[in-house]
Image (spheres, helix red, strand yellow):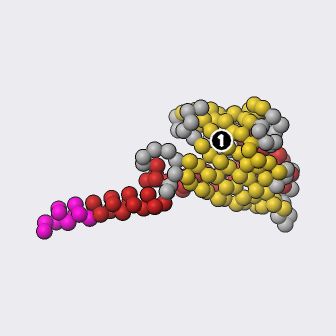
Amino acid sequence: MSLWKIIGLIATGLIVVIVLAAVLMRADRIETRVAIHIDAPPVVVWEVIADPEQRTGWMENVTSAARMTGTLGEPESTMMLRVKVGDFNLSVFEKVVGSGFPDFIRTETTDNQGELSVSTAYFLEVGNPGTDLEVVAMRSLEGSFAAYFAPFIRMRTESALEADLVRLKAVVEQAR
């Protein structure tokens, strides 16, 4: 058997393994969990998370944000965020789907094209002292090749979320 035939068989085998792994992983949704401790009471942290005017201070890609409907942080309230992704500016809409002041906020973020779907939950617990914040983000993936990109998207999402929480911590702690 020639070297090229062996290489071809190995390559084919690797492709089959990758496809099977993607199917078995059912990577149509990615869950990312990140936690941080913030030296401020949960009430203060909750108010910063719920306030669209503060989003540009702690969310790196958000260039502007505005309340659209409802009372900040209350269920069914909405905000529009302008988000910079590479060279593009996108409008995304965030709706509060669950809230328990000052313990948690759950949001759904979508775009006009229906390509983005992110569910985010912020869980706040009294720390010693301060607030222990855990954020769980669930992102839907669409398309034939979504499963192949899932590990890369998960890594980027976790990295961006960790950086945003470090900025959130700085914003909250500087305001005190």
User: Any magenta on residue 8?
Assistant: yes
- Image spot of residue 14 (x, y percent): 32, 62
Describe the element under mark 1 as helix, strand or loop. strand
- Image spot of residue 140 (x, y percent): 56, 48
In the visual, does 32 lie left or right of 52?
A: left
Image quadrant containing the N terminus: bottom left
What type is the residue that disc 1 sits on?
Answer: Thr
What is the span of residues highlighted in magenta in the rendered image? 1-10
Residue occupying image coordinates x 60% and y 43%: 117
Asked which quadrant contains residue 70, the reply is top right
Residue 63 vs residue 102, the one in the foreground: 102
In the visual, does 4 lie left or right of 44?
A: left
Residue occupying image coordinates x 52% and y 47%: 141
Q: Which residue is mark 1?
A: 109
Residue occupying image coordinates x 66% and y 59%: 34
Asked which quadrant contains residue 62, the reply is top right
Q: Is residue 94 above or below residue 152?
A: above
Q: What is the total number of numbered labels drawn onto the structure image? A: 1
Among all residues in the image, which is located at the extreme left? 1
Does the magenta stretch mainly form a helix, a strand or a loop? Answer: helix
Q: For label 1, count other residues whose C-alpha is less than 10 Å away and answer few (under 14), some (14-19) or many (20+).
A: some
Residue 150 vs residue 157, the one in the foreground: 150
- Image spot of residue 74 (x, y percent): 81, 42
Asked which quadrant contains residue 65, the reply is top right
User: Any magenta on residue 15?
Assistant: no
Q: Is residue 38 visible?
A: no
Q: Is residue 42 visible?
A: yes
